[in-house]
Image (cartoon, rainbow, N blue to C red):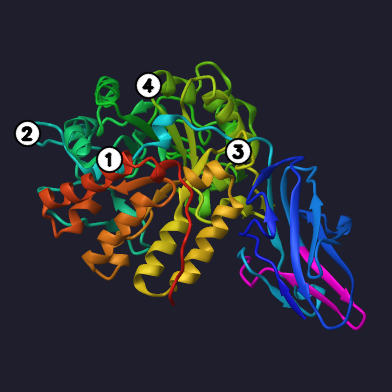
Amino acid sequence: MQVTYNSFLPTYKTPFGAVTRQTPVQFTISVQTVTPVKQIDLCVAHDGQWDDEQALPLHPISPTMYTATFIPTQVGLYFYYFRIETATMTAYYGCVDGGYGGPGVQYVLREHVQMYQLTILKAVETLPQWYREGVAYQIFVDRFNNGNADGHVNAPKPNSFIYGQLTDRPLYVRDEHRAILRWDFYGGNLRGISAKIPYLQRLGVTIIYLTPIFEASSNHRYDTGDYLKIDPVVGDLTDFDNLVAAVHRAGMRLILDGVFNHVGVDSKYFNQAGHYPTVGATQSTTSPYYPWFTFIHYPHDYDSWWGIRDLPTVDKDDPTYRDFIFGKPDSVIDYWTQRGVDGWRLDVADELPDDFIAGIRRTLDRYPDKVLIGEVWEDASHKLAYGMRRHYLEGGGLQAVMNYPLRRLIIHVLNGTLTPAEWWRELMTLKENYPATTFRFNFNNIGSHDTPRILTMLAEDRQRLRLAVQLLLTLPGVPCLYYGDEALMMGGKTLITVRFIRGRTQIRRKFSLLLTGRIGVNGTRG
């Protein structure tokens, strides 16, 4: 028996990829067999509902081609395979091991079948033009640039470690358990970012994405101390307003990092060390912040993110916390968006309930031309987190995610651990699984604050790094460069680097097909 099906091709499945509910999807399969075909079924079920599996008979349209149309009635994921019965046998046809789309394989036993994915959406998302056509640049604020004329660090934190020279290598002061004893600071600040806007313009950058800037104890500031206050090391509200104004005058946009799953142990909300005048959750059960946290044994035993005691987890279902972040007119999202923020990136989006993300999105949608991006490390279309399927890409939630799967593909193909054919199949699977606008305008990266430097991942090969940047700037998606990677490309030769990246960002702007065209491949070798 010879069976042919390819979910990437319109001959076998149309329309391609994710569709909205009630959209008819036509499936066609080719079966050539010596013995007559008795019946071919498209077996399909909604995610987790295999007891309600449908078997849709395919009817012949030629001696070897069979077709059926399926109309999805539910939003979410459907999974499907084919069952082929002849006079002498029953065979099954599904996707290859790993869940990749495209051509599949035959299976002898039903329980071994790997099923194809079909993504069903509530609605097709739209994204603002500035984002769709943008080139982003992520800045780890403390490490980027100190804009003070004399280079002093703003408001050094107690017991912190301040570097004497910008050329000093990072040093982490830890105890015997690897816990940080002193946070180290270079003193990068908002004024320093404002001063570098002309440089970013020369690179072709149109979007600046900042790691957290709210008050915190650490240099990374993912341990928020006060959501409504700029960290004094970074600057003050005037510095922030000046940065927003400078960004917008330059025709650029600004995205902030929202860390809403956890706070710092010394935050005003938890206040374990009593650094804030407010009554924190650990100081009294009558604190307005007490319901935000889950205590096992009050006050010293509590839920924290991945067991990191410095990061107590917030109960995202608590109504007062929801009101504080996005629900009330003076919420965190409202406050900073009204001050000119153009978009938000949600840290650890998998830790945030779907309706929490949807609530942020509803608040953000009250303002024109804003964007909501999530940190997701895997294929976000079928992500399972804590045993629950995530629905944040089906409409009304995230509009894009950080495209770490693409980063992995770029690194592996350039290092030779993926063949071009394997690379293409995995890329097309992402395209098939994701909503079309998400795939086309995902927040692509080849490095971030959470990853090793891309040059390290490419074995210090600068030619591979240039190829990686070229792929980042030409593949579908919104490319995001991580600060400093451009200085590594040419061994620190800044002028050559600027010319290289600027030339490719200019090409990206000049040829609209790089923004709106369809991606295809003529062939692969290897």
Helix, strand or loop at mark 2? loop
Amino acid type for the residue under numbered disc 3: Asp
Quadrant of the frame with the C terminus: bottom left
320 w.r.t. 71: above or below:
above
The circle drawn on residue 315 is 3
Relative image position of residue 306 (x, y in whole percent): 52, 54
Q: Are marks 4 and 3 in contact (CB under 8 Å)?
A: no
Please name whichever residue, 271 or 108, is drawn nearer the observer in this view of the structure. Answer: 108
Marks 3/2 in contact by CB < 8 Å: the verdict is no
In whole angstroms, how far apart are the C-alphas of marks 3 and 2? 43 Å
Q: Residues within 10 Å of mark 1 (few under 14, many from 20)?
A: many
Q: Real-space Cα distance between discs 2 and 4?
A: 29 Å
Mark 2, mark 1: which one is toward the viewer? 1
Nearest to N terminus: mark 4 or mark 3:
3
- Nearer the observer: mark 3 or 2; the answer is 2
Which percent across, then down, holds residue 163?
15, 48
User: Residue tagged by mark 1?
Assistant: 141
Residue at figure coordinates x 61%, y 51% from the top left:
381
Image point 57% across, 46% down: which residue? Answer: 351
Say what secondary structure mark 3 lies in: loop
Q: From the viewer's perspective, is residue 453 above or below residue 23? A: below
Circles 3 and 1: CB atoms closer than 8 Å: no
Q: Which residues are magenta?
A: 81-99
Gap in angstroms between the C-alphas marked 1 and 4: 18 Å
Q: Which residue is mark 4?
A: 340
Q: CA distance from mark 3 to mark 1?
A: 28 Å
Mark toward the start of the polypeptide (2 vs 4): 2
Please name the residue shown 75% across and 65% down the image. Answer: 29
Amino acid, disc 1:
Val
Looking at the rendered image, the disc whose residue lies closer to the viewer, 1 or 4, is: 4
If you read the primary sequence from the N terminus, does the residue marked by circle 3 or circle 1 appear first?
1
